[in-house]
Image (spheres, coloured by chain):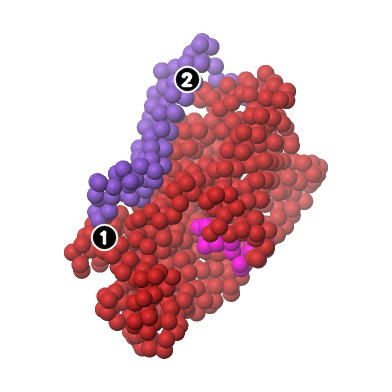
Chain colours: A red, B purple
């Protein structure tokens, strides 16, 4: 059967399941399901949170970034899991005790200030829109491949589907749909990894195969990979090549950002009990870890497979012939992906072969001169295609490829739609109804929500055409923004009784402002290409890249808040009492709606 | 603001002791959290380079797998300890 048809069957089938579950679950009690998570076991809630959380960044993009950089991009692995420790220890149980539905409501009440609530909403919108841009990049890759069109067309088609999905969907609130999405996503991610791990190491568990033996050479897999990539002039896979300070800051930004993202925090507001909020964070991380243990194996094994495909006779032998790429079924993925514009090669020296090597390396330049090569001929390999192309690269059966397509689309769509819902309710409920026009009718509120959704998807799509980075990098910027604004406000709200309204507002504005400024200076104003003054290769301050600035922004937020609070009026006694009550589980009722 | 039902421990001093015990537990857990990720995974990796794991060193393993395992253990340990602490201080939910 034709691969495109298999893909359509898998993607179609998975959607039929989600929609079916949504209809089945809704038919029962609509209002109950809106409060996603209430009455739901912490394990189920954890699984749903995992599906909510793992987006195109984790599924489509992350392993590719690890594959082509190696150890230095372990930051994504530690950052996006370590944040759950912060969430479980510092936020989740207390926000559950507080017992409202949204992050901005907590900030508004704790800092007894509508202004604080408004600023929190703005922070939330800025971080979420940036997050959606990253998702749209992933959507473009997935739909481009799936429909065999270029990535731009894929992005535009994907945007229409995301919009329809988000409008259709209170579906998002249905916990069991998310459980189904999680199941599709995790199978789609691990099954090809198991096949590949068996092929390369004989170990069916990819996480163990990564540290196992490469059967063909008898060496440890990672040692073999280090050897092969350094042979071609690339930096050693397991070595630390980047800047250590930046690596620490980047990891910290991702961790803090995880604990500051409203759509993840919200899930802990509605679990039945405070003690469940603590367990739920743990279960969410269990299900997330299943993918995160597999991701580095996917990256390393794919890098090895790709290198060997281009150097079928070993790195000191002849490179692959163009004729082989065009005729050998093992290379079918290359022409297919070429259509998306995300993979490209060019026979620069006209020898009928494609030499893939690092032409920036001095030793390789000498070898190239001797052999008559005129530069790296694998001219384009977009990191974001790695996971989706991986089963084809490893020559796996058609149904595995179809499954991965379904998983990638599920990951991107569910998170993008969830974020759009969060943005639209923030605009219509918190911004318009809460501040600008409190007397707005329910119909008007709904219309505002739809308009907000349409506007944000239009902006995200437009910016997604020229994304500020690979999907996971753009998402990392969103985490930096959340880290610098939301997390410090929440943490100070719980752990300090001294931070007052003015302090919190000043802190959030300073944190968000400096981080946004730093990002725009490096990635262009509003991410518009070529308007940047600095690059991440040569950052403005020391070695701090724009993706790592969130931790600095958070520190600025804390500092400004403490200084301003110490100079202004102290916190009133009833708010101190509120903080004391949030710290103790007893008396937690069910979550209150607005 | 909605009506808050305040959870009051049996004695005020208990409330302070409960919060202090919680903070101690959080600080202890966060030290481990930082040690395995920023420590073993990044900053202390050169010190661990002598210990080899599957073709590379222990620091690499911590950065890609070990830290995540420890994070999981930490969250479940904290949840278990805190739920016990809630009962000991009589501030758990009935």
Residue B7, horizontal then vertical, whole percent: 55, 20
* Most distant residue in the left direction: A218
> Does any portion of residue A24 appear in the rendered image?
no
* Closer to viewer: mark 1 or mark 2: 1
How busy is the neighbourhood of tag 1: few (under 14 within 10 Å), some, or many (20 plus)?
some
Q: Residue at x 23, y 59 (%)?
A: A220
> Does any portion of residue A340 appear in the rendered image?
yes
Question: Is residue A472 shown in magenta?
Answer: yes
The chain holding disc 2 is B
Question: Is residue A113 shown in magenta?
Answer: no
Stretch of the chain drawn in magenta = A459-474
In the structure shown, which secondary structural element does the residue marked by tag 2 occupy? helix
Mark 1 and mark 2: Cα distance apart in space: 48 Å
- Position of A336 with respect to A219 (left or right) is right
* The N terminus of chain A: image quadrant: bottom left
Residue A535, horizontal then vertical, whole percent: 58, 59
Residue occupied by mark 1 = A223
* Residue A484 image-quadrant placement: top right
Q: Residue at x 59, y 74 (%)?
A: A153
Residue occupied by mark 2 = B20
* Residue A416 image-quadrant placement: bottom right
**Nearest to the observer: residue A16 or residue A43:** A43
Residue B1 higher or lower than A333, as above or below: above
Dominant SS of magenta comes to helix
Q: Residue at x 51, y 69 (%)?
A: A141
In the structure shown, which secondary structural element does the residue marked by tag 1 occupy? helix
* Residue A156 image-quadrant placement: bottom right
Q: Residue at x 54, y 30 (%)?
A: A94
- Position of A454 with respect to A55 (left or right) is right
């Amino acid at each position: 059967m034709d691969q495109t048809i298999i893909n359509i069957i898998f993607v179609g089938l998975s959607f039929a399941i989600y929609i079916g579950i949504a209809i089945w679950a809704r038919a029962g009690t609509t209002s109950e399901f809106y409060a996603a998570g209430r009455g739901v076991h912490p394990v189920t809630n954890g699984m749903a949170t995992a599906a909510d959380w793992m987006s195109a960044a984790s599924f489509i993009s992350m392993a590719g970034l690890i594959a082509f950089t190696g150890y230095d991009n372990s930051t994504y692995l530690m950052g996006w899991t370590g944040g759950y420790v912060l969430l479980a220890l510092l936020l989740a149980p207390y926000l559950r005790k507080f017992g409202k539905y949204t992050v901005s409501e907590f900030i508004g009440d704790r800092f007894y200030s509508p202004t604080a609530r408004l600023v929190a909403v703005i922070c939330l919108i800025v971080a979420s829109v940036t997050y959606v841009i990253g998702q749209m990049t992933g959507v473009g890759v997935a739909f481009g491949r799936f429909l065999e069109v270029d990535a731009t067309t894929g992005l535009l088609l994907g945007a229409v589907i995301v919009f329809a999905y988000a409008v259709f969907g209170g579906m998002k609130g249905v916990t069991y749909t998310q459980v189904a999405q999680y199941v599709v996503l995790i199978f789609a991610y691990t099954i090809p990894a198991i096949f590949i791990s068996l092929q390369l190491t004989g170990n069916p568990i990819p996480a163990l195969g990564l540290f196992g033996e490469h059967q063909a050479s008898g060496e440890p897999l990672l040692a073999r990979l280090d050897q092969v990539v350094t042979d071609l002039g690339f930096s050693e896979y397991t070595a630390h090549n980047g800047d250590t300070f930046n690596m620490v800051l980047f990891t910290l930004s991702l961790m803090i950002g995880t604990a500051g993202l409203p759509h993840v925090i919200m899930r802990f507001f509605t679990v039945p009990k405070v003690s469940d909020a603590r367990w739920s964070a743990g279960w969410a991380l269990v299900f997330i870890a299943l993918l995160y243990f597999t991701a580095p194996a996917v990256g390393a094994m794919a890098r090895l497979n790709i290198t060997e495909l281009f150097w079928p006779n070993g790195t000191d032998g002849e490179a692959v012939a163009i004729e082989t790429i065009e005729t050998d079924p093992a290379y079918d993925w290359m022409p297919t992906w070429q259509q998306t514009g995300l993979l490209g090669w060019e026979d620069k020296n006209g020898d009928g072969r494609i030499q893939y090597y690092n032409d920036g390396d001095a030793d390789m330049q000498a070898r190239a001169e001797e052999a008559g090569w005129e530069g790296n001929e694998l001219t384009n390999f977009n990191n974001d295609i790695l996971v989706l192309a991986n089963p084809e690269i490893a020559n796996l059966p058609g149904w595995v490829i179809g499954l991965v397509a379904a998983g990638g689309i599920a990951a991107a769509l569910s998170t993008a739609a969830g974020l759009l819902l969060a943005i639209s309710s923030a605009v219509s409920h918190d911004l318009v109804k809460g501040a600008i026009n409190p007397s707005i009718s329910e119909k008007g509120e709904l219309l505002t929500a739809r308009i907000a959704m349409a506007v944000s998807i239009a902006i995200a799509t437009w910016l997604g055409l020229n994304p500020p980075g690979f999907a996971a990098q753009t998402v990392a910027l969103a985490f930096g923004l959340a880290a610098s604004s939301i997390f410090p406000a929440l943490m100070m709200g719980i752990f300090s009784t001294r931070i007052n309204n003015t302090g919190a507002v000043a802190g959030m504005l300073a944190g968000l402002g400096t981080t946004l400024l730093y990002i725009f200076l490096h990635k262009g104003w509003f991410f518009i290409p070529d308007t940047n003054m600095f690059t991440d290769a040569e950052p403005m301050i020391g070695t701090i890249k724009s993706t790592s600035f969130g931790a600095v922004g958070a520190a600025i937020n804390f500092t400004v808040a403490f200084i301003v609070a110490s100079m202004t009026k102290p916190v009133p006694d009833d708010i101190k009492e509120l903080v004391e009550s949030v710290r103790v589980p007893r008396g937690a009722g069910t979550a209150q709606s607005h | 603001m909605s009506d808050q039902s305040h959870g009051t421990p049996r004695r005020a001093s208990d409330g302070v002791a409960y919060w202090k015990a919680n903070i101690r537990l959080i600080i202890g857990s966060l030290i481990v959290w930082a040690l395995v990720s920023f420590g073993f995974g990044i900053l202390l990796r050169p010190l661990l380079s002598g210990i080899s794991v599957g073709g590379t060193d222990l620091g690499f393993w911590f950065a890609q797998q070990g830290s995540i395992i420890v994070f999981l253990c930490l969250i479940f340990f904290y949840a278990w300890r805190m739920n016990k602490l809630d009962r000991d201080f009589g501030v758990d939910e009935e």
